[in-house]
Image (cartoon, rainbow, N blue to C red):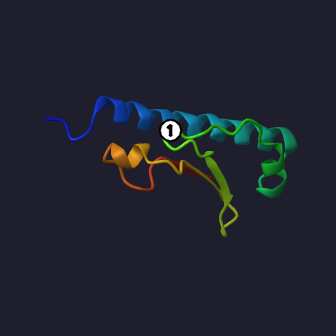
Amino acid sequence: MALFSDEDLVQAAHCRLLIEKLYFQVLGIQTRMGEKGYDQVAKQIKNVPKCPTSGELIQVKKLESGKILIYCPGAAHSAAGLPADHPQREF
């Protein structure tokens, strides 16, 4: 007996993939611009993907520490029984 369905796992994995793709897009922008901060990089981000379950845009936020946090606001990861803060990427 599974705790969650295969569909939930696929959606959670899709969220993770979208975050990783956005992460590498941001790294590319930072490399090209020579910027490490959020403000100039955020203006260059294109085609932000949407969460497959909620339809909300994947979020890119500046933390007080100056780091950038990318996370999915949708519920796919919660439905799969994963922690509420998954998936995310901080750098």
Q: Residues within 10 Å of mark 1 (few under 14, many from 20)?
A: many
Left or right of 11? Residue 68 is right
Q: Amino acid at mark 1?
A: Cys
Mark 1 highlights which residue?
15
Residue 70 in the image, given as x and y percentages of width and height: 60, 50
Residue situated furthest bottom in the rendering: 64
Position of the N terminus by quadrant: top left
* Residue 15 visible in the current orientation: yes
Residue 57 in the image, given as x and y percentages of width and height: 63, 45
Q: Image point 19% across, 36% down: which residue?
A: 2
**Residue 32 lies in quadrant:** top right
* Residue 35 visible in the current orientation: no
Q: Image point 35% across, 45% down: which residue?
A: 79
Q: Image point 51% across, 36% down: which residue?
A: 52
Q: Nearer the viewer, residue 42 or 1?
A: 1
Residue 5 in the image, given as x and y percentages of width and height: 28, 34
Left or right of 8? Residue 27 is right
**Secondary structure category for the residue under label 1:** helix
Count the marks: how many?
Answer: 1
Q: Nearer the viewer, residue 43 or 35?
A: 43
Q: Image point 62% across, 52% down: which residue?
A: 91
Residue situated furthest left in the rendering: 1
From what the image shows, is residue 83 above or below residue 30? below
